[in-house]
Image (tube, rainbow, N blue to C red):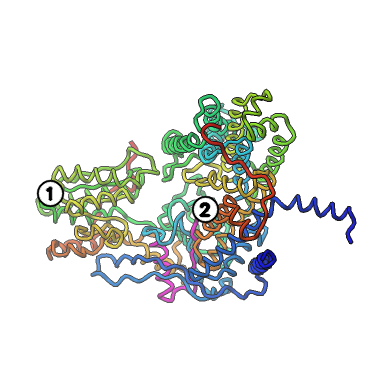
Amino acid sequence: MKKLYSLMAVVLLASMLLSACGATTPTPAATQAPAPATQAPAATSAPATQPAATQASSGTAPDCTQANVFCVGDVTDVGHVDDKSFNQSTWEGVQKAKTDGVVDWAQYIETSDSKDYAKNIDTFAQAGYKVIVTTGFNLTDPTYAAAKQYPNIMFIGVDQGLQKDANHPDWPLPNLVGLVYHEDQSGFLVGALAAMISKSHKVGGVFGTDAVPAVWRYGEGYAAGAAYEDKKNGTTTTVTRVYHNDVGFDKTFTDPDWGATTAQSMIDKGADIIFGGGGITGNGAVDKAAADKVLAIGVDTDQYYTLPEADPYLLTSAMKPIPGPLEDLIKLAKSNKFPTNGLYYGASGYAPYHDTANLVPANVDAEMQALLKGLTDGSIQTGVSAAKPAQ
Amino acid sequence: MQSTADKGFIRRLGQLLNPLLVPFLAIVTAVILGGIIIKVVGGDPIAAYKGLVQGAFGSPSALSETAVWSTPYIFAGLAVALGFKGGLFNIGAEGQIAFGAVAAALIGYALPGWLHTSIPPYIHIPLAVGAGILAGAIWGGIPGALKAYTGGHEVINTIMMNYIALNITSYLLNGPMRDPNPLNLSARTPEIAVSARIPPIFDIPGMRVHWGFVLALLMAVVVWWLLWKTTLGFEIRTVGANPDAAKYAGINVKWIITLTMALSGALAGLAGAIEVTALNYRHELGFSTGYGFDAIAIALLGKNNPYGIILAAILFGAMRNGATRMQFLTQIPIDIISVIQALILLFVAADAIIRFIYRIRAREERVVLTRGWGG
């Protein structure tokens, strides 16, 4: 009996050693990564298009070092590609480019620790990838450093609004573009809609800290949009905005309880539409409003797909859609027309009304489309500063 | 027929290797089970492990990154092991690492401003690292003193102190110590001065391995020397083995318990200080999540032996580092590494499973992890 066990141990050991060496193993066979279960947000303001199912690359990786093989790599921020947030939207954009035949091979690396940012970017660079996409503010500096180190690789930093300063003296680099958004335009659109739909003419906005410029632009754009429609229609809408400035940066976007109680106090004072802008904190406000049968407005992506419990009361979402503009940038990189001014503004927008479409009269919908057009072509200005003015 | 000299050599080799047997078989078993799990979720285990090994050891830069990952694991593993040797279970390494990093970062970026002068590296680096060691020692020494003089159990107290440390760190990094750069959106300190930075060993881009790794290896020798070659080490081990006997032998048990926890905390603080001064050049919230807890697994896997801890830390560092390439080549979720590490820990802690599977007789002394409330 004892001998049998030791024999087994030897066999197991041998098999383990063989797998470790793997000298005779051919190239990794087709492996399928788990496909993110959630759906992609529908196209901005268009009637709900069929969301494309996300799917990881399958098949054998080609030799990306060949000049004619166009490979795109995606380095996530700490987390996973199916996080229902930026990591997921970014990977959807890369996937979209693959499905549309723009790229030959797409691959992601999920970052598990912030000290690996540079290494993960480097893994793609060493393998001859032509475009490397990095997700989120935290990767700004590693992406900048890599762009300087690899001048022949195009880098796209999602949500990375850089400017020339002491730490980035050579900005803008010809091979680095930050994909950024006019959040004030998205906020303006949903603010205008809120002013037109609200019966009490009291609307609320629950936000993360306004020290983050994007949050400031959402919130102030929201008020500006409501004021624009007030002026046009002769109404007076009270816009209550509360920024979660009383806690640290690590908590301001992850405090759904604060979001819910803040929304509650606005509802108690008669607000009948609540805009939740700022990560999970805003989600708390949206969920609370919907639970109280009060209309809610989501943020960043079409939250119809990420907060299903709020669906019956989700009026729209202020969107900064990533997949479309990201694919455009990848196309530009492929055709050697990569922007060289360092920044690329993605189109702003608002999500379809979905379940609340019957609450939006045709003339309001027409006004919304006119506003989107006006903001896009510049004939309407939000008047919101890029960041909170220093006191 | 073997000569007696040969027999003696084989017996000594066996004695040397015997303590390695169970950890080794635990790793093998965990790797095999991990392979089965990869297969079940639809991956190719051979390709995955090939990627893992390549990513950890396949190139000079891979080796360098493995060393970078192993460095905090060695320091923190030594910290936990030193506690174990004194009969104390330091679960507080996480908080001690955080405070070590905060203190090193503060001295690193603020000291030149306070003194209104630049400081040469040979003074600034020791000051920054020393501040980290001191902060860790204080944060470890408090639960040590509580245990020695009031009987408050160090397991409870170190866990509590973790929460206090992490929340104070969060306050500091969001408030007084926050990077004032207007573009900064994170809870992090400014970058430390160049004079406080421990340089990389090689001046090659992409080779980040730094002198902190060498220091970690030296520290393992120091801890071994302390534990087995000094009176203090003898006292620590005696208190760990039997506090009553130690007291009867005239050892100041309360002082030794406090000192052991302070030394343990100092090593953990050193882990945080080195990460700041040699690698990240700043402290950032979210960094080091879990090093203190992985360190417990590393101490157990290394059987609380300083040299065993080096091996265990390099193994864990290699797995964390190689995971990137594994995912790059096979798209297998990086979390599989955590599963394998958890399985290793399970098999090392519950070594009866391994002994049963491979029919190994229990011959070595059992490791005393911690004592009950009365101890």
Tell me which residue sits at (42%, 68%) in the image. Answer: A35
Q: Which contiguous range is marked in magenta?
A: A88-114
| The label number, if any, that marks residue A201 in the structure image | 1
Residue B198, x across and y down, in percent: 63, 41
Coordinates of residue A224 in the picture (x, y in percent):
22, 49
Please state the chain letter of the residue tagged with numbered disc 2 in the rendered image: A
Considering depth in this image, is B16 or B279 the residue closer to the camera? B16
Query: Where, by quadrant of the figure, is residue B269 drawn?
Result: top right
| Amino acid on which the number 1 mark rests in the picture | His
- Amino acid at the residue labelled 2: Pro
Task: Work out whether residue A203 can be spotted.
Answer: yes
In this rendering, the count of numbered labels is 2
Residue B247, relative to residue A294: is it above or below?
Answer: above
Coordinates of residue A132 in the picture (x, y in percent): 50, 63
Label located before the other in sequence (2 or 1):
2
The N terminus of chain B is located in which quarter?
Answer: bottom right
How far is the residue under mark 2 from the one under mark 1? 46 Å
In depth, the one of A334 and B315 nearer the eye is: B315
For the residues labelled 2 and 1, say whether their Cβ atoms are less than 8 Å apart.
no
The residue under label 2 is: A142
Q: Position of residue B216 (x, y in %)?
A: 66, 43
